[in-house]
Amino acid sequence: MSKLLTRDFLLVSAGNFFLFLSFYALMPLLPFFLKEEYGTSGSVVGLILGSYMIACIAIRPIAGYLLDAFSRRPTYLLAYSLFAVIFCGYNMATLLSLFVAFRIMHGASFGMATVCGSTLVSQITPRERLGEGLGVYGLANTLSMCLGPMIAIWCYGRFSFSIIFIALFLIALAGVCMASLVRIPPRRTQAARRLTREAFILSDGWWMSLTQLLAYVPYGASMAYVAVYAQELGLASYGGLYFTLIAIGLGIARPISGKQADHGHMLSLNAAGITLCILTFALLGAIRFVEKPPVMLFLLIGGMQGITYGILHPTFNTLFVKLAPEERRGAANSMCQTSNDCGNGLGMLIGSGIATYWGGYHVVFLLGSLLATASLFIFLTHTVPLCKRRFAQTDC
């Protein structure tokens, strides 16, 4: 069997870790920075932070095209370097409008860098170990999700924002240095540079994209609102532990599910992950009706949520990459990450409104379970037949 943990695989994974570490460390600090430096209100803070995600999503199809039509390594280094430099730009943002401009550029560079990184790792990883490789690569995201906010909260109040932004620039710069050492094997074919719709999207990927989007709506809602929901349940002190168990579940499930996907269980794993998603959010919503919600059940749901998305992320990513020819892997990774982000963003966007007008956050999670049920239906009726037509039996 081909070796997975090669020098280049470890370097691109390390680069991914530093990228996400600086990203997750910045996220909890920005609301404090905007209020203290510019005196912005809560609604304005939300709009400014949302501009980052809009730019991130908008750039991804373009990133996929550039990766397929041009040389991938320079595209990655350019996007990653821009992402790092913009941390210094925040120190020069004397006006709120200038900060917003930097924030939009930061979102665009992050969106491009993440598509580039996953495309490069899919090119470096042996095809027969693609699922395992994507699962191991994703562990960097999980680890940085744990460490980033923790480091940021520790730094807040101890250091000025200027020093913190410079420190985050140095962390991202370390990632650029790692990425610059990665050697990319030559491609046998390269996509045409024509600006057609097919250059930006996979025509066969629409149903799979919708399947993923629906499954990720409740994930986005839970990441944004489960701490508030824990307070409603009288379990506020366990909100942090809930997120810890999500991270543990992700860390355990990602490499295992990726490896099993390579052994011909790709579709069954994906179906199992979506089924677990239905059960997880049904339980999370239903626990509201228990007179005294048990702590252990609440925490168990957190672990289940981590395992659910630890299964879904590498299997969805593997499906998208295998659906595309080698020269279209940029478009495949772009489409996968765009549907992921749209699902997350939609969950965050509608969660608060649904909870306000429909009687609480438990309604949000019960609705999320219904959306996951719709995701499973689409997966079984559209995605599975497509994959069985396109892949060898041993691949799915």
Image: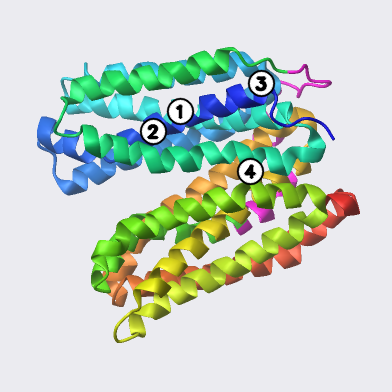
Please tell me which of labels 3 and 2 falls first in the chain. Answer: 3
Q: CA distance from mark 3 to mark 4?
A: 16 Å
Which quarter of the picture shows residue 326? Answer: top right
Q: Secondary structure at mark 1?
A: helix
Q: Secondary structure at mark 4?
A: helix
Q: Is residue 163 left or right of residue 37?
A: right
Residue placed furthest toward the bottom: 291
Q: Secondary structure at mark 2?
A: helix
Which quarter of the picture shows residue 324? Answer: top right
**Where is mark 2, residue-wise?**
23
Residue 285 visible here: yes
Please tell me which of labels 1 and 4 falls first in the chain. Answer: 1
**Where is mark 4, residue-wise?**
135
Residue 8: assigned label: 3
User: Is residue 196 located in the magenta-colored stretch of the structure?
Assistant: yes
Q: CA distance from mark 3 to mark 1?
A: 16 Å
Q: Are marks 3 and 2 in contact (CB under 8 Å)?
A: no
